[in-house]
Image (cartoon, rainbow, N blue to C red):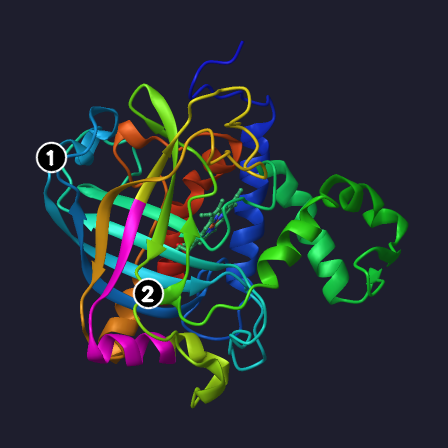
Amino acid sequence: MLQLGQECFPEDEQQTIEELVKIFEFLMRDYQFSPTPRTQHPKSHGYVQGEFIIEENMSDQFKVGIFANPQTYPVWVRFSNGSGSFDKNGNFQPDTLGDIRGISIKLLGVKGCKAFENSAPNEQDFIAVNTPIFFLKDAKAYLDFFPIVNGIKEGKITMNPDGTPNHIPDELKASYEAIAYSLPLLNGVRSQVMSSPLEANYWSATPYKFGETAMKYAVFPHIEGKKFNIDAAEDKTNYLREAMTKHLAEKDAYFDFCIQLQTDPENMKIEDPTLLWDEKESPFIKVATLKIIQQNFNSQERIEMDEKQSFSPWNCLEEYRPLGGVNRARKIYADMADFRNQINNA
Ligand code: HEM
């Protein structure tokens, strides 16, 4: 019988993670332009300042770690596109193409015991994407995913209009079979249209420890008035930055930061983030407000800070230790950021 928050560890996990590091380092060495970007979520729509305001009067079960006391923390927040596709000049794919979109939130001045020796001191990061589930079940699936994406890009794998495969070369058949489930999940997220990064819902997708149990978290926007009109954008290729720029030139933006507790270890899986945790079983409850303050964030200095910054699910208190195989593989974020900064400073 599984316990709340219980993890299961495959034997070859460390080897999988080492292989992933090799792939990401290869990708970073291979970029022909400067600065070398993040291999995942390289395109930023804005790196902005704000506040994380803990709710007052919460029920006791949510008073874990920073949520135990009403307090306001300064934050840096980065909004991004997931795709690493770029043209020969290093321009990432236009925002008009479907993609996974991310939000990375870094709370500063957080005191407490860290989950990992490589965690940044006094920082608590929360990282989320615009889908409640991740499209891969575990870290190993990432290793099969890379050759399939490349196979599709290079035309070695051809697909039918209904999304079923038309031709797969023999050497890619095993990898395709292993991750076939992930392609409709990925296409589902990519088919969503986002009006503005400040008008989207984001979810952690993967679980985290939360005191004696586990949680997933989500970030939901306050939407007042009309959403950003994509058709009226001056620069459609980069309309997500434009939407943020126009919004924050005029006013602050707000999000609710919410937590969903794991209440059933069998039906709310730790080791498979492709499965939703049922909100009827356990709803998302607001525990903080994320306020992005009115600002101009397009200076060269801010863009350089964004490029150098490192967010990681492992920049966290022990109370919110990342759980599950996908999150364990994400211990590599700090090393990947160091590697990219080394290349850029060389
Ligand atoms: C095995 C699974 C995963 C691997 C190997 C992986 C790998 C990476 C890497 C290498 C980076 C760039 C780090 C840097 O250079 O600073 C990154 C960034 C990112 N990842 Fe993942 N990732 C995984 C799963 C996830 C999941 C489940 C989410 C869902 C929340 C996610 C969301 C993001 C976001 C939003 C960023 C951008 C962070 C930033 O703004 O700096 N990733 N990922």
Q: Is residue 205 visible?
A: yes
Residue 39: image location, x then y, percent: 50, 59
Q: Is mark 2 within 8 Å of ligand 1?
A: no
| Viewer-closest of 151 and 7 | 7
Amino acid type for the residue under numbered disc 1? Asn
**x, y percent for residue 245:** 30, 78
The image quarter containing residue 43 is bottom left
Q: Residue type at mark 2?
A: Ile
Look at the numbered disc 1 and give the secondary structure of its residue.
Answer: loop
The stretch in magenta equals 242-257
Which residue does the numbered mark 2 point to in the structure image? Answer: 223
Q: Nearer the viewer, residue 102 or 291?
A: 291
**Residue at (51%, 78%) from the top-left corner?**
91
148 versus 84 height, above or below: above
Query: Where is the C terminus found, in terms of image quarters?
Result: bottom left
Residue 25 percent location from the top left of the image: 52, 53
Asked whether 330 or 129 is in front, the reply is 129
The residue carrying mark 1 is: 69
